[in-house]
Amino acid sequence: MIEVTAKQDAGAGIFTKCRDFTRAREVMAAGIYPYFTEIASAQETEVMIEGKRVLMLGSNSYLGLTCHPRVKEAAKQAIDKYGTGCAGSRFLNGTLDLHRQLEERLADFFRMEAALVFSTGFQSNLGTISALVGKNDQVVIDRLDHASIIDGTRLGFGKIRKFLHNDMEDLERVLDNCPPGPKLIVVDGIFSMEGDIARLPEIVRLAQRHGAQVMVDDAHSVGVLGAHGRGTAEHFGLEKEVDLIMTTFSKSLASIGGCVAGKEEVIHYLKHHSRALIFSASLPPSAVATVLACLDIIDEEPERRERLWEITAKMKKAFVELGFDTGKSESPIIPLFIGDLARAFQIRRILLDRGVFVNPVVPPAVPPDEALIRTSFMATHTDDQLDFALEAFEKAGKELGLI
């Protein structure tokens, strides 16, 4: 009996933090809890929440392809042929001919020698960085890089060095202070919360001067940046200077999963050393077929991207005219800086009650006292929908004294 009690006490110890975590319940009790909202419809410009139709301004489906007839049909045909899953890892029994087709298509899309598909975008960064950066290596990252990049650096055995967000002078300082040896610079192409674009020309220039390789996370850039939607490197005309391009399939590519593209020898090495790849179940065939269909549509329908940028310009201008602080955004991700966490939750709730869904972003995702409302736009939003949203923002902003 004494032994059992001791074990119970030990168990309670590790769970003490769970009992002491009360902040989320307090926000729930106040009626402004914004997370795990149930959506009872497809991810389109309007969704069903709490039994009513709501305008979606929080989706990463930038090109609006999640319900495209060709995309859905491709997923259905893949299920009919291959079933719903692969029942194993890529390393063993989980590689279909469909995976190989997608990797060849992605390598061609990114103008790289080869590509490797992972089961999630998070794993793509985690598995690539942790496999490449060894104990004698340096990995240099932007302080506002995505969590998957940060966790990838932590799993590696290299020295982690951070530079101030998009600050090229600070990046140069960091590189100047790195000891001789291999170095990998990893940055987001479009930063997922702030909406600004990495200063890739300066990054490449500094990398070449210091003998470093460059990896770009194009999760939010594919389908958005570049004349053909190939991302940040194409946007700046630097496709031959970037060493690795990573992207997710859960944004413009309307699915789940991710990939990394680069030289064949690097991809070959990752196939045999990336634990996130080797020890994870393979991406299901319907998801793979979805990405293949989306890549075709990106090539064939550039007007989607053109419309997305028309919407971006309209909304950025309108938010500024209303008096909102949109920071340095230069993409379809437009943040509205609120500052106080509670007020960010409040305006999110007010907007939802007025028929507009947005995402609040609070610490630790952003620095203290820099809570924001993250709006993101889809090529399929109509002008009437956008005008409806602006009216809701104006009323909510005035109600809280933000504008």
Image: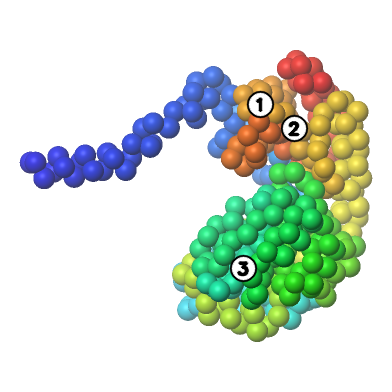
Seen at 57% across and 35% down, the residue is 35
User: Would you say 87 lies left or right of 198 here?
Assistant: left
Residue type of the residue flagged with mark 1: Asp
The picture quadrant where one finds residue 231 is bottom right
User: Would you say 393 lies left or right of 2 here?
Assistant: right
Q: Compared to 368, does 6 lie above or below? A: below
Q: Nearer the viewer, residue 326 or 68?
A: 326
Q: Which residue is mark 3?
A: 138
Q: Which residue is mark 2?
A: 337
Residue 103 point in image, percent of width and height: 68, 75
Location of the C terminus by quadrant is top right
Q: Which residue is mark 1?
A: 340
Residue 98 point in image, percent of width and height: 63, 75
Q: Compared to 208, does 391 lie above or below? A: above
Residue type of the residue flagged with mark 2: Phe
Residue found farthest to the bottom: 265
Seen at 73% across and 69% down, the residue is 214
Residue 44 point in image, percent of width and height: 73, 43
Element assignment for label 1: loop
Element assignment for label 3: strand
Closer to the chain start, of discs 3 and 2, is 3
Q: CA distance from mark 2 to mark 1?
A: 9 Å
Q: Nearer the viewer, residue 242 or 248?
A: 242
Q: CA distance from mark 3 to mark 1?
A: 36 Å
Seen at 70% across and 60% down, the residue is 174
Q: Nearer the viewer, mark 3 or mark 2?
A: 3
